[in-house]
Image: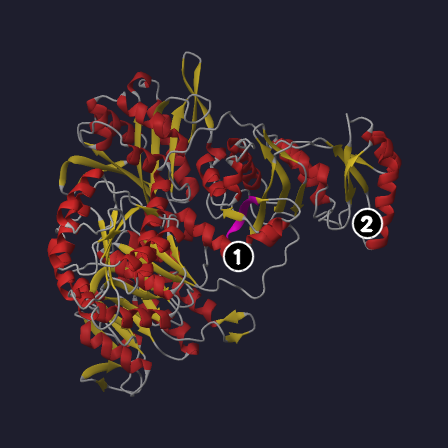
Amino acid sequence: MTIRNLDAVFNPTSVAIIGASEQQGSVGRVLTENLLEHFPGDIFLVNPKHRRMFDVKVFRDVERLPQVPDLAVIATPPKTVPGLIRALVDKGTRGACVITAGVDERSRGPGVSLRQEMLDAAKPGLLRIVGPNCLGIQVPGRGLDASFAHIFPKAGSIAFVAQSGAILTAVLDWAAPRDIGFSHIVSIGDMADVDFGDMLDYLANQPETNSILLYIEAISDTRKFMSAARAAARTKPVIVIKAGRHAEGARAASSHTGALAGHDGVYDAAFRRAGMLRVFTLEDLFDAVETLSTARPPTGSRLAILSNGGGVGVLATDALMAEGGELATLSKTSIDQLNTVLPPTWSHANPVDIIGDANGQRYADALKVLLDDRDCDGILILNCPTAVASSDEAATAVISTLPENLNKTVLTSWIGELSAKEPRRRFREQGIPTYHSPEDAVHAFSQMVNYQRNQALLMETPPSMPSLFESDIDGARRQIDLAVSENRQWLSEAESKFLLNAYGIPTVLTEVASSPAAVATVAKRFDGSVVIKILSPDITHKSDAGGVLLDVDPERAEEAAARMQERIKTARPDAALEGFTVQAMVRRPGARELIIGMVNDRQFGPVILFGQGGTAVEVLDDKALALPPLNLKLAHELVAHTNVYRLLQGYRDVPAANIGDIELALVRLSYLIADFPEIQELDINPLLADETGVLALDARVRVTKATSIGADRLAIRPYPKELEETIEVGNGRTLQLRPIVPEDGPALQSGFKKLSKDEIRNRFFAPLKLLSDLTAARFTQIDYDRQMALVLTERGIPGTTEIYGVVRLMEDPDRELAEFAIIVERSLTGHGLGAQLLRRVIEYARERGIGEIFGDVLHDNERMLKLCKKLGFSSSRKSGQANVVRVSLKLGERKQ
């Protein structure tokens, strides 16, 4: 479940407090007082030991309540909770907030936890549970304070969801004097039912919520979380702080990839992939709250700094450079205008130092010029207290100069304490972001820029793959099945390279030799010197064990292999030696050594790693992580997040590496991982990269018996290749029906241009003239776990083929309903394609367990209405839209 019945939790008309109390210092008393003070709806107090409290009638139990409460707040001993939930379900209540702690820790019998009893009791009525072990919930705009927090905030546009009640109360305490309001304050505690994914889905659709803050200790359902986060982050800012960054007991890993990945790094990759902004401290979170609640989002990264002191301007510039920011270059026009309003001794550059005796008028004059400068995206205004000018006057001038409709991000930092206190208060009062130090202000601006950049990346169309990729899935399957059937965890080097070759990742030819004599025979088949490696399932890091010999003359290969074998027998008597691998000695001067790999994270499933490779890989620790599946754009972003990326771009007389081939190898690796759930760890180290391309010199793969089906273990549902099919369109012509991909954006725009006015009107209900880049990105960059679009196209490389038709299905988060839309190019009408596409999407909806699909059709679109009637849809006039007919088809029992 996701958002079902959450309206009863966050927008109730009646609330019951079970465990209401008048006892001083009790949670029950604070809950009761808070609710009675603020909630405008019906309130029912439940306590078997009292008849009246706070001059309000008290009921003995749930069964005696005079009406069904939408929401119940429970603050009673743990053992009573399952029974109370059962009684509430029988009563018809749809939501509960369980304040009680200890529900996870106790049980009534062997193997039956109170938590599971509680969930089992809620299931028949689909009653939603927030908690247990939580502070409660607050919805200020509706007067709902079902919490034992010490402050009820003013209504605002920020939602804050946290597992920690202490963090919530700290934020409330901080926000109150700053006059910052919230749309929702939600303590989800132990997340027995309602979790972060549910809250993101719910809050994304609340118009009063403009931004979402999350304090996360753990994530329960990663695929649901990623799906909800990606959807929410496309519509409003989502800022997250994750606790537990440095776990004491890191999981032991056999591969370099596993050792490098680190669990917190995986969270970082997940947040970045979802388009969220991660902060690391409560101070950053507070700053983010203030910035989000007041500042206009930046349109770029160029910052202008206005200051009455050169020193603080330099400090701000240093902070900006440390953040990887960009100091705006003032236009000639701005320089000329500033020369007319500032004294000759001003800095004549950015930072704009208007000198220590600057009065309010000088601040106002300089600020007006910067506001008009199109070469800067944000302005940071600084003030240091001086004896010859008033800090308060400067603040007054700034406030009066800023227009109501700002076209730039403006931040302030009045430095000091005594003289800065009143200006800061006035800035907050006017909704102008203000910070105690220049560094804090610059950090806040950089966070906003990074967030906007992440959002832009989400909307970019990735480049097309250079060729239609066909993998040898059957060959790879045979190789993996053989290892699993023999209970071997690690594939041999030759087997690992076979897998990579099956997916188009270039490897150096490697042969297996069973003895030193066989090594000599194999070595002579190569042209030139060779590399000899020990072959043992017990030795994964061969270099560390002395099991790699480089640049060996074939004439001396047998002797060298024999010496290595004896040496390893002495050093590792426990290791089973199966022979050797022999490969050509690769000489590629200037090639960079990289590592690409995969590790199976315990929460997020497969994670891909890229970084600087070689024998010192863990010492260098230069890596970036990403969640599969990848496309070329995501692969490029992964590569660009490392330091080695600069080396790959070339330096001195070393030409740039073929970065496109690196990205292609990463994409193909993600396909391999998605296709085979048996793969648990994978290392390619080193992967050589130069101007000619990439070459894997060594590879190791660990496999186990699959515990999931296909790509189910991935946190993000990959491209559903199983939905591809061939469609007959008449005259022997066939087209491919397949899921849409981000690369289809330009083809979708091109197809839109061919639509007639009537076709556009029938599909979009409006006379659109073009499909913007942003709209095309939204249509093509979909989350396959909650939306599907099938395109009718020629078979070929996505992004290079024409699109002739699209059928789309958009699920609600609970899969109770899904809306469909369909369009087919008029040159192909008359072949029954519309019926085929609609039947296919109905079949897909049934497979997904969706209860009902519907669509909106203009009343004069007779062809579509006739088709829907033929396929069993019912129809009715849409309320409030006389020219729109809603067609719907019930698909039967919905899967839970």
Q: What amino acid does circle 2 point to?
A: Ala
Instruction: Indicate the quadrant where residue 677 lies.
Output: top right
Q: Are marks 1 and 2 in contact (CB under 8 Å)?
A: no
Q: CA distance from mark 1 to mark 2?
A: 32 Å
Instruction: Indicate the quadrant where residue 292 lies.
Output: bottom left
Query: What is the x, y in percent for residue 150?
Result: 27, 77
**Is 390 left, or right, of 706 in this rendering?**
left
Q: Is residue 517 above or below residue 278?
A: above
**Is 861 left, or right, of 476 in this rendering?**
left
Query: What is the x, y in percent for residue 11?
Result: 23, 62
Instruction: Indicate the quadrant where residue 259 lies.
Output: bottom right
Q: What amino acid does circle 1 point to?
A: His
Badge 2 is on which residue?
576
Q: Which mark is residue 263?
A: 1
Query: What is the x, y in percent for residue 399?
Result: 14, 58
Q: Residue at x 77, y 27 (%)?
A: 528
Provide the secondary structure element on which disc 1 rests.
helix
Q: Residue at x 49, y 46 (%)?
A: 626
| Magenta region | 603-611
104 and 294: which is toward the camera: 294
Provide the secondary structure element on which disc 2 rests.
loop
Q: Residue at x 44, y 78 (%)?
A: 79
**Is 242 left, or right, of 349 in this rendering?**
right
Look at the image and say whether residue 348 sits in the magenta stretch: no
Which residue in the rendered view is the most extreme toward the front? 344
Q: Residue at x 30, y 87 (%)?
A: 49
118 and 544: which is toward the camera: 544
The prevailing secondary structure element of the residues shown in magenta is: strand
Q: Is residue 153 visible?
A: no
Instruction: Name which of mark 1 and mark 2 comes first in the sequence.
Output: 1
Q: Label 2 neighbourhood size at 10 Å, few (<14), some (14-19), many (20+)?
A: few
Q: Is residue 287 visible?
A: yes
